[in-house]
Amino acid sequence: MASIEINSFHGGMNLAINPLLLKSYEASLAKNVDLSEIGTLKKARGYQLFKKLSETTNSDVKTLYSFYKIESSGITRFLLAEWNNGLYKYNFSTNSWEQITGTINTTENSQWVTYKNLAIRFNKNDAPKKFDGTNLSNLGGNPPQASYGVLYKERIYVAGFAPNFSTVWFSDIGDPEKWNPNNQFDVGANDGDRITGLAVLGDSLLIFKENSIWEIQVDQQNVISFKRLFAQSIGTTSARSIVNINNVLFFFDRNGIWAIYQRYPELISAKIQPFINAIQDVYSVVGWGWKNKYFLYVGDITYQDRLFKNVVLAYDTVYNQWFFYTFAHKILSQTDFIKADNTKTLYLGSQNSDTFEFDKGFSFGGYPIEVEYELPLFQPEDIEKRKLFKEVVVRLKDVSKSKPSISVSIDGGDFISLGFAEHTYSVFPIARKLGREEGRDLRLKILEVSDKEMNEIYQIVINWSPIKTVQPQK
């Protein structure tokens, strides 16, 4: 009897090639899984409700921000949320959101910058604001009413102010409340494109437009000394997709997801291109970094006539793995936050006044997580020869957690469940369920639905044998 051994699941999802060319450690579908322990298939951790802004008023939480004020007595930490035309801070002593005096427009998401012990807010519908830990007021110096802001080399740079969509303004050196009207420059003026985000990478300021990226650098006097077109026909439609992880800049472009490791963008999303092509709203994607992974909320995705709701694409930047989540809620904003005990967490903003804490438990805000992992198409030996697929053996880490089910498909037929893996070594005779065991090829699928942790899968073995041909007697 021959066997096919799957000893690792570390390859992640690969939709870019013929299923017959997938490696045994790759997947044709990897939903709500955790592949961070090399070789092991785990269930992804979820998120839990943190605190609603209101139990009676439903409104979107489009902006979250973490502000740390350095004082003589130590660091004062503020978790901020924009909601229902107001700014709120979270009181960790009373476990409640408290409104800060003042009114803001929250119909669009904002970008915040921390500088000179101020949290500075930019939103295209408001004059720039500052929050000093107590008061919310207008930022001084008559700064432009911009959509995007970033701190770069002791100046604040802003952009996204109608009708000057190719103009960047910057503050005086060391003073966020002094803005000389001559402190401005254009990038790709009159090129039919618009600035959509700003980011710092190393010694450079990168200026994103929808279809290009520009780079500037400054000299020792903090005067712009270098400006060039960094990338053409590549840009971003969403400033919220731009995330720096270990000094590598990740971002979304309508044609894919890119990473800037050194000097030029590199496409990293070829393995999941069908999902990229199915994104419906390229302007509303939201990205974040967590534990060396890049996450990108992209909304609903239809793939192979299946609808996946609230998809979050996930890329492991260390192991070059792709997989995806199907959240129970839309994600509109995010921020990571360092608590007083120096533990780090990540918060997500959603609809209906909800905020969630990411990487907590095994449910999506109280909804069970559904694991679905489809292995490659296995076709041992000659395609013309039928085989006897005898049994599937599943090796688990232990049996004290939620049990995954194993389904099989032979020769492209429907998947049929063989049962639940209940033992450290679970053996599933194929003919007992399918009524037959002959075929040319075989596929396996792993499913589990619960709000519990799933038993980790270490190994799968498919035992089979060739069909012996009886030679007629002469």
Image (spheres, helix red, strand yellow):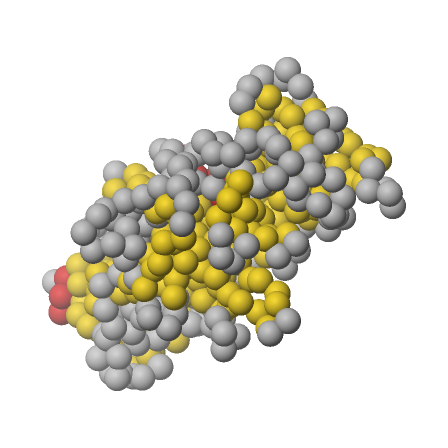
Numbered circles on residues, count: 0
Residue 120 x, y percent position in the rendering: 56, 47
Q: In this view, does 33 lie to the left or right of 368?
A: right
Q: Is residue 12 visible?
A: no
Q: Is 422 positioned to the left or the right of 149 in the image?
A: left
Residue nearest the observer in this picture, 27 or 30: 30
Q: In which quarter of the image is residue 318?
A: bottom right
Along the viewing direction, whichever of 216 and 313 lies nearer the viewer: 216
Position of the C terminus by quadrant = bottom left
Where is the N terminus found, in terms of image quarters?
A: bottom left
User: Residue farthest to the right?
Assistant: 220
Position of residue 30 measured from the top left corner of the image (x, y, whole percent): 37, 56
Observer-nearest of 354 and 123: 123
Q: Which residue is drawn at 70% across and 27% down?
A: 181
Residue 418: horizontal and vertical position, in percent? 18, 67
Q: Residue at x 78, y 40 (%)?
A: 217
Question: Toward which corner of the image does residue 55 lie, by quadrant?
Answer: bottom left
Q: In this view, does 14 lie above or below 165?
A: below
Task: Kindly identify the residue that appears in the image at 49 percent across and 57 percent down.
Answer: 134
For image coordinates 35% across by 75% down, the residue present is: 456
Residue 125 seen from this side:
yes
- Residue nearest the observer in this picture, 136 or 384: 136
